[in-house]
Amino acid sequence: MIKAKTERNPLFFYSTFFIPCAVLFVFYILILTSCSSGSHETVKVKKGLHIALVGNNLGSRMTNYDYFETEMQIRYPDSMLYFRNFCDGGNTPGFRPHAARNDPWAFPGAEKFQTELATPSGSIGHFDSPDEWLTRHKADLIIAFFGYNESFQGKEGLDNYKAELDAFIKHTLAQQYNGHSSPQVVIISPIAFEDLSHQYDLPDGKQENEHLKMYTEGMREVANNNQVLFIDVFSPTKKWFTQTKTQLTIDGSQLNEEGYRKFGVLLADQIFGKSSPKAGTNKDLVYKAVEEKNWMWLNDYKIPNGVHVYGRRYNPFGPDNYPAEIEKIREMTAIRDTAVWLAASKGEVMDIAAADKNTFPLPPVKTNYDPQKNGSLKYLYGEEAVSKLKVPPGYKIEMFASEQEFPELAKPMQMSFDNKGRLWVATMPSYPHYKPGDSKPDDKIIILEDTDSDGRANKLTVFADSLHLPVGFEIAPEGVYVSQGTNLKLLIDTNGDDKADKQVILLSGFDDHDTHHNSHAFTADPSGAIYSGEGVFLHTNVETSYGPVRATNGGFYRYAPQLHKLERTAQLSIPNPWGIAFDDWGQPFFAETSGPDVRWMMPGTVLPRYGEATHKSFNLIEEAHRVRPTSGLEFVSSRHFPD
């Protein structure tokens, strides 16, 4: 038996230490290479997975461009994936304002991460909290989109944001929304900023991308510390913007349709792993089904006119009228879930109209109108109505168009003449909002024209239909800007036939909690910027390329199309302003509508603070001339008038 020597053989030491170390070193290099190339664990798809999207405008606009959900449904057609999008413009991990919720906080303690946004804003109601919504929908997987709004706080705000995100993740992981286990959490970074400054008067994105990259890395750190999946979409989208000639955003910060098409595939690959669609031939069918489902879903989660359903105007009629409508909407949304799964798995088109007939029947709504108290309901038409109007001596009113001749003119909202002398009118028979079970809204913008110069309209053209509550519009060379619920849209006629055949969603996040308070009564100022009014109760949060615009209660916006820039130009203690007019010096004036006051806007056009109203100017209308209600305002001048 030979004893081993106590001294080490140099060759033995080399083979037992340096070679394993070399192997470890190579292995370490492989790990680093794998991480740097974006390799990471992915989420396993199981049948019936409930997926909840929470966060900001990047996620919210996905209900307008449904490519991510469509991609998932055709990749996993037999999995019956259940998607709900809870995103909204301006949201942060802890700050999720809603006009019908008593506080804006997503979890206990979230208020400590805010300063100005912690100011009480007057939101009142019983709209469910974020946790309550996620529990109702039994969320298994939370996909969270944050970081864009916060990035405008720069380096100084990064540590606070990381702490807020960390608190959100810890709170979320402590929940059991599905009733039996903690949710999986995926954190999505903001996208990069696309440089469109060579085409438009927009930021070039250099500073924005510095901040976005900084916040992306901060989010990665927080996610890793909490052992949740982090998806960096900043880096790949930055490559898209530099390597492709196709424009992928509308304004540098918001993806357009083609951008969301690519983004949907990117998210599916990064979160769940790359795989080919099993039901790719059903893609168009599935997209339409998803689009229909999400339209109905938003009539639940973002129900227009929710002030009567959950908010300040819930009493006295809300308890009687709305529970049945909510139940019916949710049944109709569930039907559309089934339609998505059938389209994906079998390529079938479900007869949703037939299925809707079996949903909860709405009880009749009792009218509170009393003819003895409120007068006759007889509606006067045409010349009979004109005969009842009183004007000063020397003046007369002539009828240009009547609902009798043009039925599409029913329920006009706003009107404006173009440079050809044609009268454009927005009509909204669907007011105050869509009623579940009815056909989809078909509000319109129409053009009335006098082609034979007799002073009466004899031609009607429908410029746009299938609208819902167009409470404001403005004509411009590039198209027609129109208010559409939470969105500001540009309707474009591409072939000159006076019919809109293209639309662009310019901005999202306007509050339609009270639909006749929604951003309305569009009026162009002398520069071509568009002013609009907004009424009390509302809480608007719009993400722009210049940062989030946050507004509470009554006030005015100014949107500069040349810059794609929105400003909260005045935030005043007013109920609901309908009517904005400019004098010869370009100064704005407005009518309050609910009251008889007309005021000079200029003194109130200072930088607003969240939750606070700026002092307004004096009323300009003499007591003897006060009327109520008012519905418009205009300066009238003409060479025909006497000096």
Image: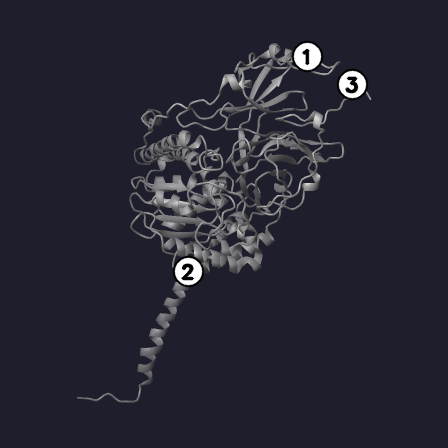
Q: Who is closer to the viewer here, 404 or 125?
A: 125
Vertical order, 364 against 125 (above or below):
above
Q: Residue at x 41, y 48 (%)?
A: 143
Instruction: Tell me the number on the disc at residue 640.
Output: 3
First in residue order: circle 1 vs circle 3? 1
Instruction: Tell me the number on the disc at residue 158.
Output: none
Q: Look at discs 1 and 3 and give the one toward the viewer.
A: 3
Q: Residue at x 46, y 53 (%)?
A: 232
The crowding category of the residue bearing disc 1, from other C-alpha atoms within 10 Å (few below 14, some 14 to 19, many at least 20), is few
First in residue order: circle 1 vs circle 2? 2
Identify the amino acid type marked 1. Answer: Ser
Disc 2, disc 3: CB below 8 Å? no
Rendering coords of residue 64 (x, y %): 47, 37
Q: Is residue 63 visible?
A: yes
Rendering coords of residue 638 (x, y %): 76, 22
Task: Locate residue 583: give its quadrant.
Answer: top right
Instruction: Tell me the number on the disc at residue 224.
Output: 2
Task: Locate residue 353: give its quadrant.
Answer: top left
